[in-house]
Image (spheres, grey):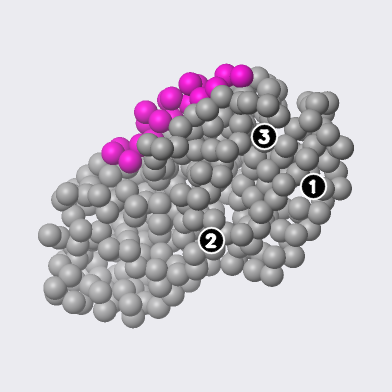
Amino acid sequence: MKNVLLVTGESKECGIYQYADSVFEILKTSKKYEFTFLATNNKDDLFNHIENEENNTVAIIYNHHPHTMNWLNSGITRPIKNSGLVKQIVIFGHEHLNTFTGVDHYIHTDPNAGHNDFLASGEFAGIPPITYYDDIQYSKPEGTIRIGTSGIGNRTKDLPTLIRLINEQFTEDVILNLHVSDGVFVDPSGKLSGALVDQCLELANSNVKINFTRDFLSKRNLISWLNQNDINLYWYQTPDVPGVSGSVDRALASRKPFGVNHSSFLSHVRRDFNDLTKVSIKDIIAAGVEPLQEFYDAWNPTNLLNLYEDIIEK
């Protein structure tokens, strides 16, 4: 079977790596190609793989960010293109839109890319890599409302505003579950994550009980954790750069309602029914999971696999 190599940086405690890992989980179900996952900070690992004739590599997918794959450049992609044997595809839009000589196609992380007619020939809008698990399903709230939020510790994830929002909308007891993990590139020491948790504890009203976890969770475990909440909230203050939040991929897979603000990182999942600037947290909870069906229909593993296989076959 022909091999397709998916390459990303090697640090797992990173949203860029987790995106590639999620894509790979879906791609490896292909019946047309054998997909191989290569997490490396060394270009020699790339060349060793494609030069091994037994691998029969016909395409390379680079999951690129200049911090996680700073070794990738046109000096690598050009000779591979000149060999005429391997197609090259770059996943871009993780805050950057870097291009390289000899790349055949680009896949933008933003599923709304192209709606503003900025995609060039050979560029495609991606599909969020969301895997839905049969044993993770929607359940109605019972007892005290449980609100959750998750992500790598970062001030762009505006947790203080979420606390203020909860303070304003709840006078009864409510539980806020925080999952704030340390990131290799954003918060390697963990000081920022700790400071954010302390700030939340300080700002919360007495009726808001805060539970928090700092351990990095696998994708499956994080989705299960989100499923235990009645709603998950995401309020970002982000610069206007390309890309979308991977945290909401997990929220969708958890089969629970979620609310978002106006951040460009969340625009692909913002609708009137879950816009925290327009509707209350309680209203989003009351609507249940049915309004999310449009996302489940459009963003499923089958559609993502078809997109990548079609691009490879072009």
Reading the image, the residue beneath label 3 is 146
Instruction: Write the start and end of the magenta stretch as one range.
Output: 286-303
Q: Earlier in the sequence, mark 1 or mark 2?
A: 2
Q: Distance between the residues labelled 1 and 3?
A: 16 Å
The structure residue drawn at horizontal position 54% and vertical position 38%, both measured from the top left corner, is: 227
Q: Is residue 101 visible?
A: no
Drawn side of residue 31 relative to residue 7, left or right? left
Task: Give yes or no for residue 291 being in the magenta stretch.
Answer: yes
Q: Distance between the residues labelled 2 and 3?
A: 27 Å
Reading the image, the residue beneath label 1 is 200
Secondary structure of residue under mark 3: strand
Badge 3 crowding class, 10 Å Cα cut-off, few under 14, some 14 to 19, many 20 or more, is some
Q: Position of residue 228 (x, y in %)?
A: 57, 38
Secondary structure of residue under mark 1: helix
The structure residue drawn at horizontal position 80% and vertical position 37%, both measured from the top left corner, is: 208
Q: Is the magenta stretch mostly helix, strand or loop?
A: helix
Quarter occupied by residue 141 = top right
Tag shown at residue 137 = none
Q: Which of marks 1 and 3 is in front?
A: 3
Q: Which of marks 1 and 3 is nearer the N terminus?
A: 3
Task: Give yes or no for residue 201 being in the magenta stretch.
Answer: no
Residue 183 against residue 136 in the figure, above or below? below
Reading the image, the residue beneath label 2 is 14
Residue 225 against residue 67 in the figure, above or below? above
The structure residue drawn at horizontal position 40% and vertical position 78%, both measured from the top left corner, is: 42
Badge 1 crowding class, 10 Å Cα cut-off, few under 14, some 14 to 19, many 20 or more, is some
